[in-house]
Amino acid sequence: MTKQAYVALVTCFNEDETINYKATRAQVRRQVEAGNNIMCAGTNGDFSALTFEEKVRLTEEVVDEVGGRVRVIVNAGMPATFETLKLAREFDRIGVDGIAVITPFFIACTQDGLIRHFSIVADAVKTPVYLYDIPARTQNHIEPETARTLAGHGNIAGIKDSGGAKETLEAYLKVAKEVEGFEVYSGPDHLVLWALENGAAGCISGLGNAMPQVLSRILKAFNAGDIAEAEKQQATFAAFRTDLYALGFAPAMVKRALFLQDASVGASRQPALLPNKEQDDQIAEILARYSLL
């Protein structure tokens, strides 16, 4: 099976914090040209700062710009099953390739509660549903046994693991080996190649916003059986990650790095981290070091 790279696309904003759809479309084209698929309205896309109507329009704009050239997954996850379900039905209507559902945030959930939540959404749409685990941000974690239970649902196609722990990723990959058709996508950018080598269907990367070509080369080399080249590209990707993320909150650093490459992406909605000149100078130095500026 050919492994797939997705980029968790940033959402571009104007100075008044309205969405800049034209600039967002330009970022879609940039990723498509690099050979990457798209995930929109995810963590790197400021999904928690977007309104219901904005998420629907954003998805329509991305799907239209892609024009079937690559795959599009969109995140419908919200704290309440009620709104998650409404969003998922809209995305189903638009015609995306997959609907990711991040675990509810703010509301503490039991594992049985998570099973009900995901199952209700998956029951209501025709589009394949992907679980999305990022406990550092949501405080709700999909236990491997819960993933195994949900993997038996006919319309739950896989999971995006953004927990950052290799042990959890290994446990999800074990589920994928046991349940035919259940796919695991790795979120941590330092584990892209490791995950591919251990059975992942691909990755969903935030860092790929700032370094799309290197991400694409990891996947292309791996799919071609050139592991030495894949290792070389992964080393560059991981080193860039280490340098950039040392400066602050990862999504904010990615967005600012991309802003310094192309100011049309704008800043994020408040109360996101505000940029400062000292930090911008540090980011610019890192970008120049990797020939990205």
Image: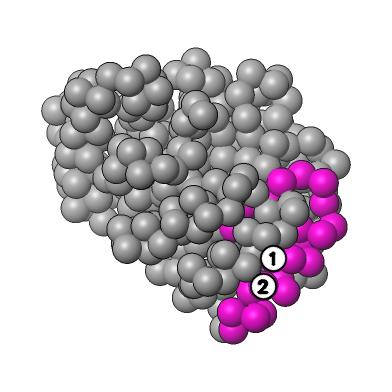
Q: In this view, does 244 lie above or below 226?
A: below
Q: Which residue is drawn at 44% across and 53% down?
A: 173
Task: Give x and y (percent) for residue 89.
Answer: 83, 52
Q: Distance between the residues labelled 2 and 1?
A: 5 Å
Residue 67 within the segment the image draws in magenta? no
Taking depth in this image into account, of 121 and 52 the one nearest to the observer is 121
Q: Is any part of residue 63 visible from this angle?
A: yes
Give the secondary structure at mark 2.
helix
Q: Which residue is drawn at 51% across and 29% down?
A: 1
Task: Name the quadrant containing residue 149.
Answer: bottom right
Q: Give the residues in magenta.
A: 110-131
Q: Nearer the viewer, residue 207 or 58?
A: 207
Q: Does the magenta stretch include residue 113?
A: yes
Q: Which amino acid does label 2 sit on?
A: Ile
Residue at label 1?
118
Q: Is the magenta stretch mostly helix, strand or loop?
A: helix
Mark 2–mark 1 CB contact (< 8 Å): yes
**Circle 1 residues within 10 Å: few <14, some 14–19, many ≥20:** many
Q: Name the residue tied to disc 2.
A: 115
Q: Which amino acid does label 1 sit on?
A: Phe
